[in-house]
Image (cartoon, rainbow, N blue to C red):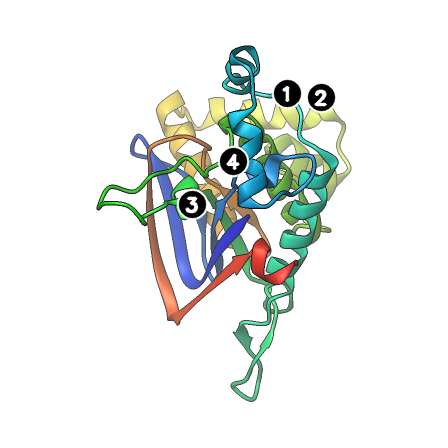
Amino acid sequence: MRFLVQRVTRAAVKVEGRTVGEIGRGVLVFVGISKSDLMEERHSMEERHSMEEGHSAETNSAEKKECEEVSAHSIELAGKMTKKLLGLRIFEDENGKTNLDLKSVGGSLLVISQFTLYADCRRGNRPSFTNAGNPGKANLLYQYIINLCRQEIETGNKPEGSDIGDVCIMEEGLSMEEGLSMEEGLSMEEGLSKEQKFSMEKDHSTEKRLSGGRVEAGIFGADMKVEFVNDGPFTVLLDSDEILH
């Protein structure tokens, strides 16, 4: 498993022209998951090659299908890598020393899936990606990593999906019906069209994404456009084969 970590002042990811993830100061991390990360136990390259040669045609066909679960080994590996990521002290303290982690500075995290981190360029000029993990399992592990990050970074934050009705309930002690009624009345009284209301909600969502202590993510397998400003520059590569073994 590989995490390409970049300290940023801002970062955003778009899919089909729509922003699906955006942060201010924090960390942008590209996540690469390999075949060996998804095995029940780790094996050497020679052992893995031997195992693949010995598979029957039926087994090979089954491996091509999206898998519905990942192994305990994969979960453990993801947990250790995520802990290492969130514990990296790559932000400056009051003395200008890189001595603070992401949560200490109230930073946010943008997580992007990146199978090309396992590009094999040893032969020819066209990279091979055969070392990348099965998309079905890799996606599940990617989502698991995102959830782990949210549990740690967003502790105490209001969950996604909060709307005007929820805010009314929290701040004024109103019932759900009263909160929703106020929301509907506000929209009707101001004569907002659906497009205008969507635009307002979008602006509010962007403001929340740019606030500190949040975890945003790209869409696994999508054609993504990633924009960011690397602060430093400061880039670190975390490879599970090097730091966990």
Q: Earlier in the sequence, mark 1 or mark 4?
A: 4
Residue 158 in percent (x, y) is at 67, 44
Rounded to the nearest angstrom, the CA distance separating label 2 from label 1 is 39 Å
Residue type pointed to by label 1: Glu
Q: Nearer the viewer, mark 2 or mark 1?
A: 1
Rounded to the nearest angstrom, the CA distance separating label 3 from label 2 is 52 Å
- Residue matched to label 1: 68
Q: Earlier in the sequence, mark 1 or mark 3?
A: 1
- Residue matched to label 4: 49
In percent of the image, x 36 and y 45: which residue is there?
120
User: How many residues crowd around disc 1 within 10 Å: few (fewer than 14), some, or many (20 or more)?
Assistant: few
Residue reaching furthest to the top: 58
Rounded to the nearest angstrom, the CA distance separating label 3 from label 4 is 17 Å
Residue type pointed to by label 4: His
Q: Earlier in the sequence, mark 2 or mark 4?
A: 4
Residue 134 in percent (x, y) is at 51, 29
Give the left or right position of residue 31, taking residue 71 as reference. Answer: left
